[in-house]
């Protein structure tokens, strides 16, 4: 494998195809913020603004500014989105809405704690780019809110009857693995340490099940298996994505054994989730082989494959495991053959099981300027380092 | 078309394949109520109890008892389910939970008003079978609760910010068209009349859009179009199902022009929703042709096709429209070729766009003993009447 050529492929896709797509099509110059519902060629088909995606795009452009090139236009795009978020994105107490109208009127209440997670990332990265204390404060205070809400993230909007089956979910500890490093520059080192130790334990010892060697999406409060739709659920892309967050922590904490364990889990999950018939990674599976409740279980999603590419190449860079490289090649081939679009920028998001485009969009309610450019950036940089070795 | 042979086919499937499947596999003899998560051959794969499906099965067996044959074992199955529902199904004020554990502990709060709708149907039908006043009272009181909650069905669990985009949904007026006739024997005639007039207006004049000739799932409070994901949504099966409720009302009210209009809407919707490439009716579409937010949009669902069969054959019986008969043949052929199972009873529920089985189950969280047997019954009886003409 020629790391130099490959690295150029990811860099070129990022800088010449993906970033320009969002620069050219997503900016709402009238009301601020970003359009994310974009057809194949970039045409806007819906103008609602989803906080997850607004915040992720602020983060992405601040990140490009911080780590690729200090282009003033990239910083300006991030600042424009941040201004819209500051004005309209939260309820006045940094509880971040789920969605807004184009003009910024709140549509859906702050029931979803991941809006807060992505706002934390966005303002944290932007505070790095600008040194602006207000951005830093928004990021820190929102992070504190998340920690406070972490035992019942949906609050009043939780439809579960308390006590009957009090499962806990993988998403929040997983994202905190990433978030703690993202805004480390803003936090008291003790808070970083205690948070990191707690979420590392959750991800690698509570949600990880030694019997199967897989990570479950939901477990009983004591970490045991719940034989229910939620308890049986596997989300291979989610577990594999978490493994590169763990690899980053492994480097930061200088604990190489963590990277080894993350590689083992990622490879096992990938083999389990791979569709031998049509290629690609399934979206959802039931660990007992029952029909999952998610009707979209067999679809092939962009983020699943892109996050897997990051995990595999980082896994190889950190451990030298050759299986990572072989699988990287396989997932790379599948992804570029099915998700990439030779004619227009950005990648397709949703394929059917057979690998055909299911929704001819480049952005929507859940897909914005995030997984594709972040993935291109991460893979490019990791390949570049491998080439320099 | 030989109505006699066809009628026998539906009757035989109902009485010899579908009803026995539920009799043999769904009864929880230990804790009461019904299992609905059943594999292809009837094996239970999950024991949670969903109020929609518990109530619908009570209704179905009471209906069979009332209208097919007064078999004591059918009544007993309905009574067993009703006892479980009375004990565990609601919060003490006839607000019906969404789901329970196998033992009857509440899992998901009464956020979903359709639990209440199906409980009303169940106890209404059972009061007919037994003359039991308590069942009648549960049905009537729950119906009053539904009317009270109808402006904000989700109550405290509504995640929408009030005022920004106050859409109203098609489901509730649609189901009330059916419910008002279902429990007419329990209601004050004035309440029946006022409810029926209100919901007829909603379905045929508010949600129905004269420009496109189609029914939208969500509209602005004044009935106008909302250019949003929810506002653009079409659910062809839902609209077509509503049209046989309207046909029943047309007969009951002796207003044949209603049946004519219902036939027009149903045929237009069916042509719009038919998949010319693979056959079958799409699950969701966007009226502007944009990508819908539902990833399962292109799947072929059992209830969509079965409800369509009912609408087409009733439409033919009431209006003599030959197009109804031609389309009935086409949808009949597709449904029996793809959903029916020659080896085990009950029909598959979920096919991919290509018509292949997507989930090899006969019952789940949303599929129980309802659409297949109700559809077989309705088509059988309508064909029988056509044969007698």
Image (cartoon, coloured by chain):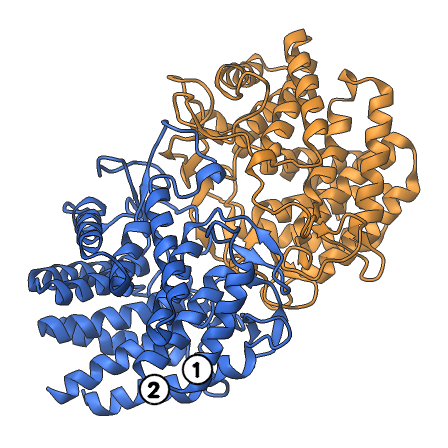
Chain colours: A orange, B blue
Q: Quadrant of the N terminus of chain B?
A: bottom left
| Residue, disc 1 | B74
Q: Earlier in the sequence, mark 1 or mark 2?
A: 2
Asked whether, in this view, residue B123 is left or right of residue B344, the answer is left
Q: What residue sits 39% from the left and 46% below the top? A: B291
Task: Out of A150 and A178, give the one closest to the viewer.
Answer: A150
Q: Residue at x 40, y 29 (%)?
A: B162
Quadrant for residue B8, please give it.
Answer: bottom left
Q: Is A171 or A22 nearer to us in this picture?
A: A171
Quadrant for the C terminus of chain B, please: bottom left
- Is residue B256 visible from the viewing direction of this image? yes
Where in the figure is residue A165, as x and y percent of width and height? 68, 52
A137 relative to A208, above or below: above
Q: Chain of mark 2?
A: B
Q: In the rendered image, which residue does mark 2 sit on?
A: B69
Q: Is residue A324 left or right of residue A115?
A: right
Closest to the observer: A239 or B117?
A: B117
Q: Residue at left 22%, top 35%?
A: B222
Q: Secondary structure at mark 2?
A: loop
């Amino acid at each position: 494998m020629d790391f130099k050529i490959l690295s150029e492929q990811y860099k070129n896709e990022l800088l010449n195809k993906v970033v320009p797509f969002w620069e050219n099509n997503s900016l709402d110059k009238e009301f601020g913020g970003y359009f994310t519902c974009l057809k194949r060629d970039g045409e806007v088909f819906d103008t609602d603004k989803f906080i997850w995606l607004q915040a992720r795009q602020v983060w992405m452009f601040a990140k490009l500014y911080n780590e690729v090139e200090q282009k003033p236009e990239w910083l300006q795009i991030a600042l424009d989105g941040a201004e819209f978020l500051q004005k309209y994105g939260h309820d006045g107490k940094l509880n971040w809405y789920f969605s807004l109208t184009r003009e910024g009127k709140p549509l859906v209440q702050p029931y979803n704690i991941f809006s807060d997670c992505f706002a934390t990332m966005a303002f944290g990265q932007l505070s790095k780019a600008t040194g602006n204390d207000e951005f830093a404060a928004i990021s820190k205070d929102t992070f504190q809110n998340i920690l406070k809400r972490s035992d019942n993230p949906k609050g009043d909007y939780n439809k579960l009857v308390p006590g009957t089956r009090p499962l806990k979910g993988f998403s929040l500890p997983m994202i905190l693995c990433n978030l703690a490093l993202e805004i480390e520059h803003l936090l008291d080192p003790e808070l970083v340490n205690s948070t990191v130790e707690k979420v590392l334990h959750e991800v690698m010892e509570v949600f990880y099940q030694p019997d199967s060697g897989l990570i479950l999406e939901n477990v009983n409060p004591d970490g045991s298996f719940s034989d229910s739709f939620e308890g049986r659920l596997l989300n291979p892309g989610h577990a594999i994505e978490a493994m590169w967050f763990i690899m980053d922590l492994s480097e930061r904490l200088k604990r190489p054994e963590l990277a080894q364990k993350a590689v083992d889990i990622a490879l096992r999950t990938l083999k389990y989730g791979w569709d031998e018939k049509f290629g690609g990674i399934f979206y959802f599976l039931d660990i007992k082989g029952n029909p999952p409740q998610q009707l979209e279980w067999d679809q092939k999603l962009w983020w699943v494959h892109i996050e897997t590419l990051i995990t595999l190449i980082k896994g190889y860079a950190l451990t030298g495991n050759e299986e990572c490289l072989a699988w990287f090649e396989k997932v790379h081939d599948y992804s570029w053959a099915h998700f990439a679009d030779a004619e227009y920028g950005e990648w397709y998001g949703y394929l059917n099981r057979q690998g055909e485009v299911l929704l001819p969009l480049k952005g929507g309610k859940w897909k914005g300027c995030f997984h594709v450019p972040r993935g291109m950036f991460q893979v490019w940089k990791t390949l570049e380092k491998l080439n320099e070795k």
